[in-house]
Amino acid sequence: MLRRRRARGRKPFVSAGATICWSRAWQALEPSRRNRDSCFYTVLRFRADHPDLRSGNIAEELSGQLGKSLTAAGVRKTLERARDRFADLLLDEIAQAVDAPTRERLEEELIDLGLLEHCKSALDRRDA
């Protein structure tokens, strides 16, 4: 019974911790918005805000906003790279908050925060 209470009591803290790391990763990615050659923030933010749009529609919308021609294939590739960069930044945020950021400790923290699926590839890249 006591364990259950502790687990329930920990959940809001875990959610808050994940939210803070998530926000900081977005903030860290944002300077790419100002770099005309690397629009990771813009494309990823647009995708996050419009999850049901297909890459062709995203390309049309963002071509007008960015003032350059984008293709569906280009959007997909940029999204792939942006997601990788975002995962790296998210993992960096978590590593800063952990005392001894070993792979095992980071993986444990990611599981606790519910972010392992978002950062698994970044964790693997970090080990390479």
Image (cartoon, grey):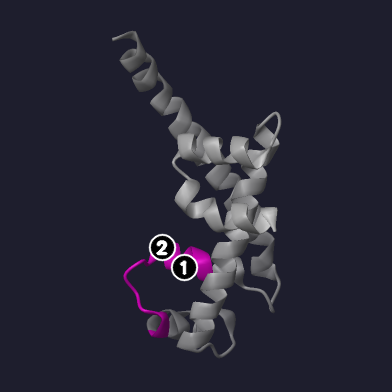
- Position of 101 with respect to 20 (left or right) is right
Residue 27 appears in the rendering = no
In the depicted view, which residue is nearer to us: 45 or 87? 87
Q: Report the quarter where the N terminus lies.
A: top left
Q: Is residue 121 magenta?
A: no
The type of residue carrying mark 1 is: Phe
Could you tell me which residue is drawn at 55 percent across and 46 percent down? 23
Residue denoted by label 1: 46
Are dots 2 and 1 in contact, CB under 8 Å?
Answer: yes
Whether residue 90 appears in this view of the structure is: yes
Residue at 44% in and 34% down: 15
Image coordinates of residue 42 in percent, x first then y, are: 56, 69
The location of residue 35, given as percent across then percent down, is 71, 72
- 100 relative position to 7: left or right: right
Q: Principal SS element in the magenta part? A: helix
Residue underneath mark 2: 49
Residue at image position (52%, 72%) is 79
Residue at the limit of the structure toward the top, as seen here? 2
